[in-house]
Image: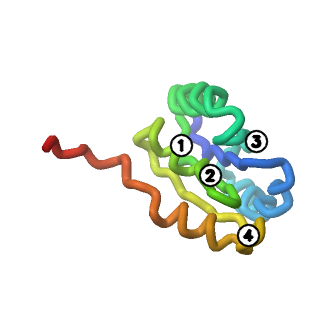
Amino acid sequence: MVRPFVAILIGSDLDLPRIQLAVDVLKKLDVPVEVKVHSAHYTPEVIRNYVKDADQRCAAAFIACAGMAAHLAGVVSSLTIKPVIGVPIDTGPLDGLDALLSTVQMPDTSRPRLSP
């Protein structure tokens, strides 16, 4: 039987220390977790392939952590109907404000769109 897991995606390997506590907590709770480093800007096709594969392997949810423009959560959300938690990282000249605004204003892709 395949066991559900949480997929954590980060935009840069520099963000690994920032998510370590989340990984530790999930493991302590006996929740399987995968961590992948993929950039929404530089490797969108890799993200698409990973999300589709993770969905097929029973990913229960995705956590997308990114700084600056923080497109990662939006990209992941556009590829799955599973829950996506966007986590803005405080990097760049705006200390994460741009990442926060990009993340909280991400469109909700889980709802069907109404035709005009």
- The answer to whether any part of residue 2 appears in the image is no
Q: Which callout, 1 or 2, points to the residue nearer the camera?
A: 1
Q: Residue 16 got which mark?
A: none
Q: Which residue is mark 2?
A: 64
Q: Is 13 positioned to the left or the right of 5 in the image?
A: right
Q: Secondary structure at mark 4?
A: loop
The one nearer the camera, 51 or 46, is 46
Q: Which callout, 4 or 3, points to the residue nearer the camera?
A: 4
Disc 4 from disc 3: Cα separation: 17 Å
Q: Amino acid at mark 4?
A: Asp
Q: Which residue is mark 3?
A: 37
Task: Check contact, mark 1 vs mark 2: CB within 8 A.
Answer: yes
- Quarter the N terminus occupies: top right
Disc 4 from disc 2: Cα separation: 14 Å
Q: Amino acid at mark 3?
A: Val
Q: Which callout, 4 or 2, points to the residue nearer the camera?
A: 4
- 96 is higher (above) or lower (below) than 86: below
User: Which one is earlier in the sequence, the residue at label 2 or at label 3?
Assistant: 3
Q: Secondary structure at mark 2?
A: strand
Q: Which residue is mark 4?
A: 90
Q: Residue 75 got which mark?
A: 1
- 21 is higher (above) or lower (below) than 113: below
